[in-house]
Image: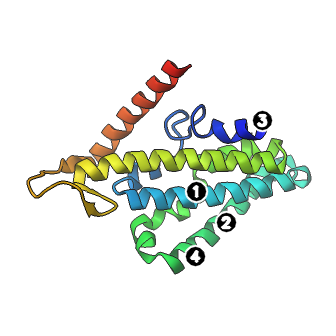
């Protein structure tokens, strides 16, 4: 039951994007297409799970004075591995995400989970927390990028959805459209959460 709670918190109650408003920079930058949002989300899931596990395992031997630099080194190691895998197996995704993959190292979501959860909980709980937060982040990115790509470009996963007469709202794939969709998504998500509670 505790493992399920650790997992589900990141999806709904503590969704990093819509409830905690963390990781805003990549959220705004990569959600112009579903492919980009999904790719970034999967990369963050991998880094969150691996870094949470290692930080949970080494927590007892890490001196309190240097814990943050050590967490950053652990996270940077996994980000480098994920970046190399993306470069090797998906050059298109690497090109689309650009600098935002290396910036996962300083992503608020990952550092916050390392400090507030993984450093204080057992390895299995830390894995479930990382998975839940990563899935919550990915779902938020896919939702936002789906709205922006569909209405801003008339496509979904780069496949045309609407007929030739459709005029896309180009503002939605530009930065102001990102802010608009993000604000409306936060409002909708929180309205649904409050209503459910």
Say which residue label 1 marks: 44
> In the rendered image, which residue does mark 3 sit on?
1
> Looking at the image, is mark 3 or mark 2 nearer the viewer?
3
Of the image marks 3 and 2, the number of the one nearer the N terminus: 3
Contact between marks 1 and 2 (CB within 8 A): the answer is no
First reached walking from the N terminus: tag 3 or tag 1: 3
Please name the residue shown 73% across and 61% down the image. Answer: 74
- As helix, strand or loop, the secondary structure at mark 1 comes to helix
Separation (CA) of disc 3 from disc 4: 36 Å
Residue 1 placement, left or right of 189: right
Q: In which quarter of the image is the N terminus?
A: top right
Q: How crowded is mark 1: few (under 14 residues within 10 Å), some or many (20 or more)?
A: many
Question: For mark 3, does the 10 Å Cα neighbourhood hold few (<14), some (14 to 19), or many (20 or more) residues?
Answer: few
Label drawn at residue 78: 2
Q: Nearer the viewer, residue 8 or 66?
A: 8
Q: Where is residue 92 in the image (x, y as percent from the top left)?
A: 40, 74
Q: What residue lies at 55% left-to-right and 64% top-to-bottom?
A: 102
| Disc nearer the start of the sequence (4/1) | 1
3D distance between C-alphas at marks 1 and 2:
10 Å
Q: How far apart are marks 4 and 1 (CA)?
A: 14 Å
Label whose residue precedes the other's in the sequence (2 or 4): 2
Residue 30 place in picture, x, y as percent: 40, 56
């Amino acid at each position: 039951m505790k493992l399920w709670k650790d997992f589900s918190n990141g999806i709904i109650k503590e969704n990093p994007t819509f409830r905690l408003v963390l990781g805003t920079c990549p959220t705004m930058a990569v959600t112009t297409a579903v492919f980009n949002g999904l790719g970034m989300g999967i990369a963050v899931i991998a880094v969150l799970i691996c870094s949470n596990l290692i930080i949970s395992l080494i927590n007892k031997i890490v001196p309190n004075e240097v814990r943050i630099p050590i967490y950053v080194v652990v996270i940077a190691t996994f980000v480098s591995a994920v970046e190399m895998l993306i470069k090797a197996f998906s050059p298109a995704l690497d090109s689309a995400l650009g600098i935002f993959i290396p910036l996962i190292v300083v992503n608020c979501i990952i550092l916050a989970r390392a400090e507030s959860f993984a450093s204080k909980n057992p390895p299995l709980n830390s894995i479930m927390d990382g998975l839940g937060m990563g899935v919550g982040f990915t779902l938020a990115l896919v939702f936002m990028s789906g709205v922006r790509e569909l209405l801003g470009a008339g496509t979904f996963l780069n496949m045309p959805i609407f007929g030739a007469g459709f005029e896309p709202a180009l503002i939605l794939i530009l930065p102001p459209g990102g802010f608009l969709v993000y604000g409306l998504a936060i409002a909708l998500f929180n309205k649904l959460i409050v209503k459910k509670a």
